[in-house]
Each structure stands twice: as structure tokens, then as C-alpha cells.
Image (tube, rainbow, N blue to C red):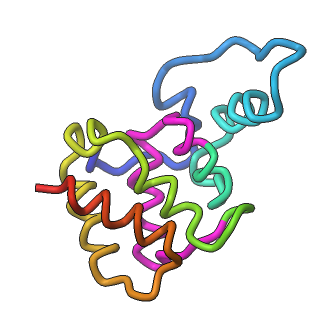
Amino acid sequence: MTRPVDRDRSLEELERDRWPAPPADASRLISTAHDLRRRPIGELTVEDMRLLIGQDIGLAYLLPLALEVLRDNPMAEGHMYEGDLLSAVLTRSPGVWEEWPELGLELGAIVSGLADLPVPLSQKTARFLALQP
């Protein structure tokens, strides 16, 4: 997890797991997630990461990248609202942070210094921090 990752490789390559093509009647979300898994992770946008992380896809590779973005701009915005990447990261299950405690500590350091957050994001931050050791 903490080792450098080849950003020229896709999640499919990194995870060594090729998903079959989505069904013809797949939702836009499913089709988009399938497409993004084939894109090099270094080319993923904030919105791409928000979408994939929100679906618990590629967390081992995407959470460290998302934390890089959040370190520089905690309120980084995809296509939904200011801070939507932070929201996606904060709302992962507690098991994620148990599996990768170093990432939880880093996220805790990022959010503990934030002030004047919108109420929904402030609540998510408080819930996350309450679960940290």
C-alpha cells in the first residue's frame, strides 16, 4: 500500500482483475466504472476518483492518490459539490481504515485542521474522527 505505484497502469492491471464488459442495459454508473478501471490511474480526475472510491472500487490504489489531492486541497471538487472527494473518502466503511490504518491516520491529520465545513461534511468528518483510535 505504501509502496510507489505505477501510475501508467490501470486498476485492471494493478489488481490483475479484468472485468467482463458491462451488460448492454447497464446503468451509466456501471458503464463508467468499467471504463475507468481500464484507464491509467495517473490519468484519473478528482471526479473519477470520487466515483470509484464511492463504489469501493480500487481502494488500495485510489485512496493514497485521493489523499495526495486532499493534502493539497481538502475541498477538491468533482462534478457534485465542493468537498465531494473528501466526502467519498470519509464515508468508507470502518473496515477500510482498519485494513489501512496509516491512511486513516493521514486522513485524520488532514481533516482535524479543517474549519467552517458545510454541515453535512462536518458531520461526516466528526463520524470519521470518532472511529479513529
* Quadrant for the C terminus in the image: bottom left
Q: Which residue corresponds to the image point at 47% horizontal and 80% vertical from the top-left?
A: 117
Give the answer, above or below, for where 131 lies relative to 112: above
Q: Which residue corresponds to the image point at 31% horizontal and 66% vertical from the top-left?
A: 126
Q: Relative to residue 3, is residue 88 drawn left or right?
A: right
* Quadrant for the N terminus in the image: top left
Q: Which residues are magenta?
A: 52-77
Q: Which residue corresponds to the image point at 51% horizontal and 53% vertical from the top-left?
A: 88
The percent coordinates of residue 56 (x first, y second) are: 49, 36
Q: Relative to residue 56, is residue 24 drawn left or right?
A: right
The percent coordinates of residue 29 (x first, y second) are: 75, 35
Q: Relative to residue 108, is residue 55 drawn left or right?
A: right
The percent coordinates of residue 33 (x first, y second) are: 69, 34
Q: Which residue corresponds to the image point at 52% horizontal and 49% vertical from the top-left?
A: 7
Prevailing secondary structure of the magenta residues: helix
Residue that lies at the very extreme toward the left in this rendered image: 133
Residue 40 appears in which quarter of the rendering?
top right
The percent coordinates of residue 98 (x first, y second) are: 20, 41
Give the answer, above or below, for where 58 lies relative to 111: above
Q: Is residue 92 part of the magenta span, yes or no? A: no
Q: Is residue 59 part of the magenta span, yes or no? A: yes
**Which residue is more in the foreground, 4 or 23?**
23
Q: How many marks on residues?
A: 0
Residue that lies at the very extreme toward the bottom in this rendered image: 116
